Amino acid sequence: MLTPEQCRAFASDFKRKAQAFDTSKDRSFIMVNIARSLAGLATQLEMLADKVREEARRAPAGGNPLPRSTARRGSALSGRGSEF
């Protein structure tokens, strides 16, 4: 999974490449939008990590903060269990 730092690095790279003199206007437009999406993803990943930490603090000691049916379910994207 990408980290917020990696998302921001990719966003910066896309933005820099979009501003290159030899990049077409159409390609630049797309690259700037990708950069914005990656920056937004970085923020959302940080928000998710904050929420996971907050919920873990409120969970009973030794207990799983997720409902039983959710805790057993794997991630639809990875096919494995999720750390969130």
Image (cartoon, helix red, strand yellow):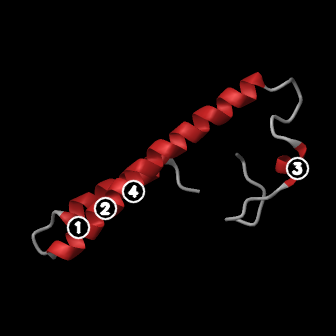
**Residue at (45% x, 42% y) in the render:** 43
Query: How far from the left and from the top, in percent, is residue 80?
Result: 77, 62
Classify 22 as above or below 34: below
36 or 69: nearer the viewer = 69
Looking at the rendered structure, the number of numbered marks drawn on it comes to 4
Element under disc 3: helix
- Looking at the picture, which amino acid does disc 2 mark? Asn
- Between the residue at mark 2 and the residue at mark 1, the CA separation in whole angstroms equals 6 Å
State left or right for residue 28 relative to residue 46: left
| Residue 34 appears left or right of 56 | left
The answer to whether residue 23 of the structure is visible from this angle is no
Near mark 1 (Cα within 10 A), the count class, few <14, some 14-19 or many ≥20, is some
Question: First in sequence: mark 1 or mark 3?
Answer: 1
Q: Does 83 sit above or below residue 81?
A: above
List x then y, in percent, for residue 46.
52, 39
Q: At 70% across and 45% down in the image, what residue appears?
A: 84
The answer to whether residue 76 is left or right of residue 71 is left
Q: Which mark is residue 69?
A: 3
Disc 4 from disc 1: Cα separation: 13 Å
What is the number of the mark on residue 33?
Answer: 2
Dot 4 corresponds to which residue? 37
C-alpha gap between disc 4 and disc 3: 32 Å
| Separation (CA) of disc 2 from disc 4 | 6 Å
Whichever of labels 4 and 1 marks the residue nearer the N terminus, that label is 1
The amino acid at mark 1 is Phe
Q: Quadrant of the N terminus?
A: bottom right
- The residue under the point 15% across, 73% down is 25
Picture quarter containing residue 29? bottom left
Residue at disc 2, secondary structure: helix
